Amino acid sequence: MVTANALKDLPRTAQALAEEMPKLARRLQTAGIRLEDAPRSEADIMGLFDKIPGTSKLGVSEWDIRVFLSDKHGSHIHPHSKGGSNSTENIVWEVGTDNIRRGARTMSAGEHHYVRFYNAVDSILKNSATIAVALPIIQSLVRRIEADGFGGEFKAQYEAAILRG
């Protein structure tokens, strides 16, 4: 309930986002889009906003959200060169160097899961001052995932896929 209350003041439309957080709105509008592509729809802009972890949105701070995105690209799951679209369903926020290293290869399921896990942890670490109360819970969760071998498996698959490059 505390998290829901903390997120209730976030913009709900692309227009509200552009008014309240103009630099972020521009970033979401252009992430993963080539110059010759059609502009992203308002629904897709908000879809990309929804893909930003909630922990980066706590406090409704454009700065905190931009810090989370600072090293991220709008990465295509199915590459643009292989017919992949710019729709929200085909874009994830991924560390830019990993996106570039993959190039025109389709993102594997393991890579996709690792990116989602990495983003959740990265968001927590980058916004630790905002969510300091939740840190012991998150650490316990991460230790549990690693102890079960879940996190290591996805990380190994991700690294192997990147090396195959």
Image (cartoon, helix red, strand yellow):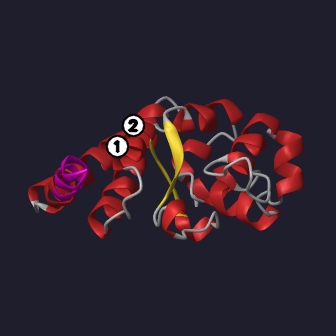
Is residue 8 covered in magenta? no
Residue at the (15%, 54%) spot, across then down: 156
**On the image, numbered disc 1 is attached to which residue?**
101
Which quadrant holds the N terminus?
bottom right
67 and 110: which is toward the camera: 110
Tell me whether the residue at label 2 lies in contact with that at label 1, contact meaning CB atoms closer than 8 angstroms.
Answer: yes
The picture places residue 70, in percent across and down from the top left corner, at: 54, 32
Name the secondary structure under disc 2.
helix
Q: Amino acid at mark 1?
A: Arg
Note whether residue 157 is visible.
yes
Is residue 161 covered in magenta? yes
Magenta: main secondary structure: helix
Tell me the number on the disc at residue 97: 2
The picture places residue 85, in percent across and down from the top left corner, at: 60, 68
Q: Amino acid at mark 2?
A: Thr
What is the span of residues highlighted in magenta in the rendered image?
Answer: 157-165
